[in-house]
Image (cartoon, coloured by chain):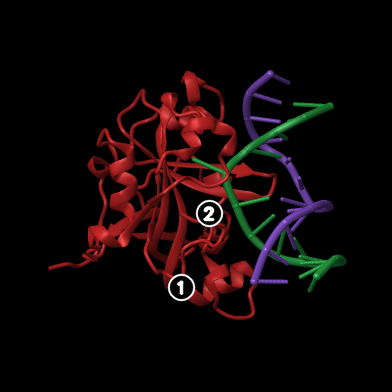
Chain colours: A red, B purple, C green
Amino acid sequence: MAFQQKLTPDFFTRPDVVTIARDLIGKSFYSCFDGVLTGGMVVETEAYSGTSDAACHAHLGRRTKRTQIMYQQGGVAYVYLIYGIYSLFNVVTNVEGTADAVLIRALEPLEGIEEMRLRRGLPKIEPRLTAGPGLLTQALGISTQHNGTDLSGTEIWFEDRGVHIPENQIIAGPRVGVAYAGADALLPWRFSLQGNRWVSKANPKY
DNA sequence: TCGTTGATTATCT
DNA sequence: GATAATCAACGAC
């Protein structure tokens, strides 16, 4: 019975954030606000590995108002504002005291597509609907006020819909927009679904 | 089709 | 006061 099953905290509290980022490809991501359900299949993620990762906000154990949420136990939302405009959504992973997180970069729309189109202000359905970390938050109505939301609740959650992604269809590559992180920027910690048209376009080549 | 640049604000120095 | 895990508009070809 490969029906919808909400991912529980034990999925997110596993120790290897890179494995979780890869496992999230093919899972479904939903939000439900004011009775409006929107969501889609995850087709692109990036792993950020806490204090040892130069690209992570919590690098070297920085613990600030913004990053403290990443030190919580896996299964809560880390949402922050970037470039003064866009909200980026991450899932906190690992156990309390570590600062690992997975950035959700792109979705393939499944539910509430018309509502997402309206939120994005687009005249028609196109990849710009959810193909990008700053775009999918707009489409799902997620903003910084959802920072810290428990993903086992009823507002924002992940589901396993029984979709199986063959290992060889998942592409690993360097992360986007983190050139300042030096050698860590080259780590193949970005995962995407090969050939999927909803993967974000701001892609380096491989 | 490509490269360049402006938008706009919370957070950190 | 500078900068950022981005996007879209615009001008050059």
Please state which of the two labelled residues, at mark 1 or mark 2, is closer to the viewer: 2
Residue C3, above or below A203: above
Quarter residue A155 falls in: bottom left
Above or below, comparing residue A133 to residue A73 in the picture:
below
Whether residue A26 can be seen here = no
Give how far across and how far down residue A96 sits, in percent: 33, 26
Residue at 68 percent across and 44 percent down: it is A83
Q: Which of A168 and A139 is in front in this view?
A: A168
Q: In this figure, which residue is indicated by the disc labeled 1?
A: A112
Give x and y (percent) for residue A86.
Answer: 63, 51
Residue appearing at x 55%, y 78% in the figure: A125
- Where is residue A196? Give x, y as percent: 41, 69
Asked if the residue under mark 2 is in contact with the one under mark 1, i.e. CB atoms within 8 Å, the reply is no
Specify the amino acid type for callout 2.
Pro
Q: Crowding near pointer 2: few (<14 within 10 Å), some, many (20+)?
A: few
Q: Which mark is residue A204?
A: 2
Gap in angstroms between the C-alphas marked 1 and 2: 30 Å
* Vertical side of A62 occupied by A202: above or below: below
Residue A169 visible at all: yes
Q: In this view, does C13 lie to the left or right of A185?
A: right
- Which residue is most to the bottom? A124
Q: Nearer the viewer, residue A161 or B6?
A: B6
Q: What secondary structure is found at the residue carrying circle 1?
A: loop
Residue drawn 47% across the image and 39% down it: A186
Q: Is residue A50 left or right of residue C3?
A: left
Quarter of the C terminus of chain A within the rendering: bottom left
Mark 1 burial class by Cα count in 10 Å: few <14, some 14-19, many 20+: some
Residue type at the position of mark 1 = Gly
